[in-house]
Amino acid sequence: MNRSKSGLTTATAAAGLTVLGLLLNGCKGIQQPGERQARASLASVQQAYWPGATLPRLDANSGLSNYLQFAMMTQPQVRAAYFDWAASVERITVERSLPDPKLTFQAYIEDVLTSLMPGLMQDFSGPGKLKAAANVAGAGSKAKYFAFETAALQTAFAVKQAYYQLWFLDGKIRINRETLNLLADLAKIARAQNEVGKVTLQDVYRAQIEQDRLATEISNLEDSRRPLTAQFKGALGLTRDQPDPAMPARFETTPLNLNGDALLDTAFARNPRLKAMEADVRMAEASIALARKSKVPDFSAGLQAEVYTPPFYWPQASMSLPIWRDKIAAQIAAAQAGKRAAEARLTAEQIDVTVDFAMKSYEYREITRNLTLLQDKLIPKARKSLEIARAGYLAGQIDFLNLIDAQRALLNFQLEEVEARTRREIILADMSLSIAGIAPEGAPILPPSSGDASPLSATSRNLKH
């Protein structure tokens, strides 16, 4: 009878522990506010970015925005940054969760098994430790998000840079071909002048030398299309086995309001590199709070059931003793030093953004003035000069060297104008994307939020004024 009762109790204890283990296995922790916000942000971006997002169509009639959106969706660097961010969001759940419970067994054996005590043990972090760890992971997740946004904007800039270089390459080739046709006419004039004895054969050779030089330059420009196309294709995230993309048939510039103070304010509010470093500062602050929690003890609690002499239970409890004060002080000091380093990096980046903005703004104004000079004065005057030199050569008033110099001056001014237009467009793209952080249409990123204003904005204002 006792043996039967003992067996029934053993089965009951085992069944109870099994049920308790299954219940604990199905438990979920309590989400922190930062965790809920991070998951909502990830879900919002995931709808537009991954998985199975519809890629825009690319053909000659597609706008530049289609190419930018396509690149941000397919570029492997952007995808890697996205999954780094997704992993960091999941890390918040890991950090705020309790350790797994432990199933324990204890037995006493002399000649036979005299005592068997299955049990369950759970470790508990000290008050506030899990929340502090979750705050560190949450701040790290924000930094990873802004790294993803930076990768998306850098990809958009790479597409625009290659796009403008390819587009204006056709302008250079066109100008050189027009000049080559002009040289062919000048060579005919030189031959005619030589046939009637007005000039020597040297003028004909000079014209042919210029023709040969310019024909080689055209070949070099046409050959440069291959690496530029590869650069454009790579920026779009296309691999070597995929066909080359079609170039847009319509040229699109970068619209940007270059009001200095307003644009710099936008840069300090939206530049993702600055936002990432601000998140690093917040993570360092959360790390200090977590380090200070290291002086709080951790706990363990459990229960064991005696199988052979029921009903008898052995409660168990333990507590860590954070007695190493120098270790605790070192953890806090390391976290504080990490915060100071993060603040210094943020200030350095703010200075870099301010200086970069000033340099790019100056370069834009300089190029705009040079373009106005070239388009309104130098190129029209060079055309007039060439016409006068041509007439003077036909009349025998000037030599062929002066005529060639006039032709070279016009060609150089025309090529400078194309180079200046290319450079100006690249600067505009760089200022809008890399400095101001203004995302192009269809970018798979979170919209800027006024609630994201940094508590470090006072530092930003001090740097700007």
Image (cartoon, grey):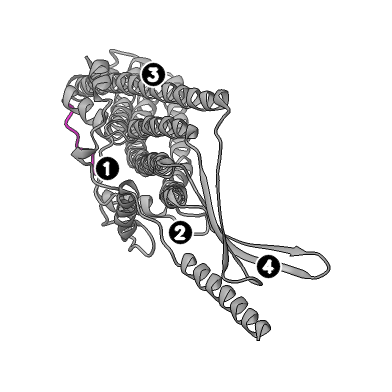
- Secondary element at image label 3: loop
Q: Which tag is nearer the camera, tag 3 or tag 1?
A: 1
- Labels in figure, total: 4
| Marks 4/3: CA–CA distance | 120 Å
Percent coordinates x, y for residue 204 in the rendering:
43, 25
| Marks 4/1: CA–CA distance | 66 Å
Residue wearing tag 1 = 439
Residue wearing tag 4 = 116
Q: Residues within 10 Å of mark 2 (few under 14, many from 20)?
A: few
Residue wearing tag 3 = 199
Residue at 36 percent across and 41 percent down: it is 142
The amino acid at mark 2 is Pro
Q: Earlier in the sequence, mark 4 or mark 1?
A: 4
- Secondary element at image label 1: loop
The amino acid at mark 3 is Val
When the figure is inspected, residue 388 is found, relative to residue 311, above or below; the finding is: above
The amino acid at mark 4 is Leu
Q: Quadrant of residue 207?
A: top left
Whether tag 2 and tag 1 are in contact, CB under 8 A, the answer is no
- Quadrant in which the N terminus appears: bottom right
| Marks 2/1: CA–CA distance | 27 Å
- Secondary element at image label 2: loop
- Secondary element at image label 4: strand
Residue at 39 percent across and 62 percent down: it is 51
Percent coordinates x, y for residue 153 in the rendering:
34, 41
Q: Is residue 356 left or right of residue 326?
A: left
Q: Which tag is nearer the camera, tag 2 or tag 1?
A: 1
Q: Which residues are drawn in magenta? A: 252-259
| Marks 4/2: CA–CA distance | 71 Å
Residue wearing tag 2 = 243
Percent coordinates x, y for residue 131 in the rendering:
39, 43
